[in-house]
Image (tube, rainbow, N blue to C red):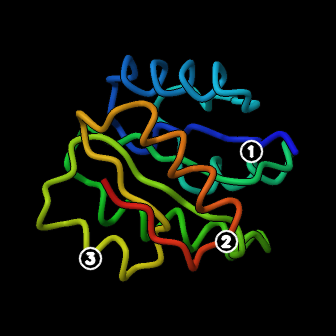
Amino acid sequence: MTIKVLIAKPGLDGHDVGAKLVGRALAEAGMQVSYSGLKRSPEQIAERAAAEGVDVVGLSVMSGAHLPLAKSALAALKEKGLGHLPLVVGGVIPERDREPLLALGVAAVFPVGTPFEDVVKGIEQVVGTGNKARATR
């Protein structure tokens, strides 16, 4: 099975180099990757996830707003009937925010500096076992 990943840039964050590099690493690992573009709302992200039939949604957040954006994205996915999809979050994520993100329902957290091979394995883990898996660095 080819894993389909949507990498999304929520909020007003205008930095997407990391998201594009992660997307390339996932594609090189055999995953089908689509990229939302910059400054997408949680609702736009959920709509895109539904339209593309993805297996996992990855938020790339560099702005520091990862907790409210993850909460909003999870709510938008649930509203679209996609509450079963794993949501992973990467970017500038302080260690103190890992557990609060997981408690919200985020399936995995990949802070800046996470090796690409760990991101690939983490995505495979959360897709293979659903939201119950908690991939960590």
Above or below for 33 versus 92: above
On residue 58, the disc is none
Q: Nearer the viewer, mark 3 or mark 2?
A: 2
Q: Left or right? Give the position of 55 relative to 134.
A: right
Q: Amino acid at mark 1?
A: Arg
Q: Amino acid at mark 3?
A: Pro
Q: Nearer the viewer, residue 128 or 72?
A: 128
Please state the horizontal and vertical placement of residue 77, each as a whole percent of the image: 66, 67
Instruction: Name the residue: 49% across, 56% down.
Output: 88
Number of numbered labels in the structure image: 3
Q: Residues within 10 Å of mark 2 (few under 14, many from 20)?
A: some
Labels 2 and 1 touching (C-beta < 8 A): no
Above or below for 20 versus 58: above
On residue 48, the disc is 1
Q: Nearer the viewer, mark 2 or mark 1?
A: 2
Q: Nearer the viewer, residue 80 or 30?
A: 30
Q: Earlier in the sequence, mark 2 or mark 1?
A: 1
For label 2, the residue is 130
Q: Residues within 10 Å of mark 1 (few under 14, many from 20)?
A: some
Callout 1: helix, strand or loop?
Answer: helix
Q: Earlier in the sequence, mark 3 or mark 2?
A: 3
Q: Amino acid at mark 2?
A: Gly
Please state the horizontal and vertical placement of residue 113, each as a whole percent of the image: 23, 33
Q: Left or right? Give the position of 109 relative to 64.
A: right
Q: Nearer the viewer, mark 1 or mark 3?
A: 3
Instruction: Name the residue: 60% across, 29% down.
Output: 26
Please state the horizontal and vertical placement of residue 10, each as a whole percent of the image: 45, 44
Labels 1 and 3 touching (C-beta < 8 A): no
For label 3, the residue is 100
